Image: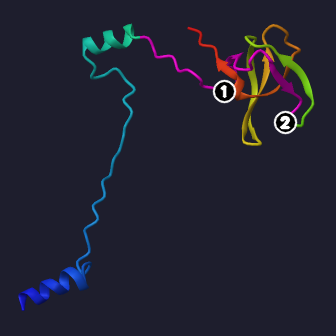
Amino acid sequence: MFLGLLFFQLFIFPNIFPASEQNADLRITPYSTREGLNHKDEDFLESTPAPLIHEVFSVGIKVEISGTGGDGLRMRESPDMDSEVLYLAHEGEDCIIVEGPQIEENLIWWKIQSLEEETKSGWSVQTYMTTIITN
């Protein structure tokens, strides 16, 4: 009889006893004050420079035109491949992001402005930009 019940339990009704669902409640509280830090921790915080984050794009970030194979980067009137080309940013030219992002045609577009000629600005694809890291 016992074997019959075991057979029923394992093969006919394997889920008759529901598994217990245990949920964890995880709370993360940021520690924003220096209370509780010992002298060694304070020395570390003051002597360790913040890491530089590469390839983060946002308004106000300086970028260099790169990866165009010397052809330059088209600066367009709007974020669209069919839009009129206003200027050509040359390979190695430094620009600043002034607007964006816009995602069109599966491309990320930023409006950039040349640091050499302030009147030279337009929408360009992020693929041909690298961020300029300054300390």
| Label 1 Cα crowd, 10 Å radius (few <14 / some 14-19 / many 20+) | some
Q: Amino acid at mark 2?
A: Met
Badge 1 element: loop
Part of the protein shown in magenta: 49-78
From the image, give the main secondary structure of the stretch colored magenta.
loop
Quarter of the image with the C terminus in it: top right
Q: Residue at x 26, y 75 (%)?
A: 18
Q: Is 120 left, or right, of 31 in this rendering?
A: right
What residue did someone put label 2 on?
Answer: 81
Query: Magenta stretch containing residue 58, yes or no?
Result: yes
- Which of the marked residues, 2 or 1, is nearer the chain's N terminus? 1
Q: Is 7 left, or right, of 56 in this rendering?
A: left
Kindly report the distance in space between the C-alpha atoms of the residues bearing marks 2 and 1: 21 Å
Question: Does residue 1 sit above or below 46 in this rendering?
Answer: below
Q: Residue at x 8, y 86 (%)?
A: 3
Badge 2 element: loop
Q: Residue furthest bottom?
A: 1
Q: Residue at x 30, y 54 (%)?
A: 24
* Image-quadrant location for residue 36: top left
Q: As rendered, which of 36 and 81 lies closer to the eye? A: 81
| Label 2 Cα crowd, 10 Å radius (few <14 / some 14-19 / many 20+) | some
Q: Is 1 left, or right, of 60 in this rendering?
A: left
Quarter of the image with the N terminus in it: bottom left
Q: Residue at x 84, y 24 (%)?
A: 75
Q: Amino acid at mark 1?
A: Ser
Residue 100: x %, y % from top left: 74, 32
Query: Magenta stretch containing residue 71, yes or no?
Result: yes
Residue 25: x %, y % from top left: 32, 52
For residue 58, which numbered disc appears in the image? 1
Q: Is 85 left, or right, of 37 in this rendering?
A: right
* Image-quadrant location for residue 15: bottom left
